[in-house]
Image (spheres, rainbow, N blue to C red):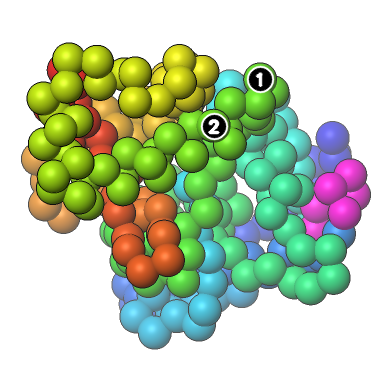
Amino acid sequence: MAEIQDMYRYERIPHPAYLETTRILTLSPGSEDEPLSGTLAPMSTTHPHPFEALSYVWGRAGTWDEITIDGKVVRLTASLGTMLRRIRYRDAPHVIWADQICINQEDMVERSQQVRHMSSIYQKASKVLVWLGEDSAGYARSAFELVEALVAIVKDESRLQDFKEEQTTFDWFSEESWIALRELFKQPWVCISHDWDRDSTDANAVRPKMDFTGDRHRYSLWSLLGRFESILG
């Protein structure tokens, strides 16, 4: 880890600019095993230029990574470090918003100011990238294939009625597919986000638009969960 004198020093976004300003990270290109680097710049939350927003679980305290911003170091959780290495381009910069980097986590005043922008940031992002974690057991492909199949059922009323009435609903798909989906729902991001979303009563709460997109259809993971929780109990 870098010495304290090498750490990046944030400049607080002044009043009244902070009312409609956040920071945006331009992540430098590189391969997965190269150190992370990039630059930070102010960005209007009212009229932002194209960017992607990240959603992830911070992970366990005590496991750290780092990124070099303008030649100085910002400390990251290992979870975010892994995500950034996976999503960065090899030959072009990648413009993204990640709370750990774009908000000064050591400044409680700034953190409280920036929280008000988070709903707008996720809504205005061209894409929200979700990091569920490492797929060490190889469940991801089967899990998302089953999600797509279940969405197709939800969109077809006759098939959905059959699915509800069948006593052997789980036999529609292989046991391995259901196990993969169960493992997907065990991921910390899914558990935390689903519990928060289900329990929240604030219509203006910060809720990322976590949509999985098909050819011509958009469907929310949470609406899918809601439908099948009522069907399957």
Residue 101 percent location from the top left of the image: 60, 53
Query: Where does label 1 land, which residue?
Result: 137
**Magenta highlight range:** 31-37
Which secondary structure type mostly characterizes the magenta part of the structure?
A: loop
Per the image, label 1 sits on a secondary structure element best described as loop
Residue 32, relative to residue 15: is it above or below?
above
Query: Is residue 117 visible in this depiction of the protein?
Result: no
Label 1 Cα neighbours within 10 Å, binned few <14 / some 14-19 / many ≥20: few
Image quarter hosting the C terminus? top left
SS type, badge 2: helix
Residue at position x 72%, y 64% in the image: 27
| Residue 142's disc number | 2
Q: Quadrant of residue 28?
A: bottom right
Residue at 89% over, 44% down: 33
Mark in front: 2 vs 1: 2
- Amino acid found under the numbered disc labelled 1: Ala
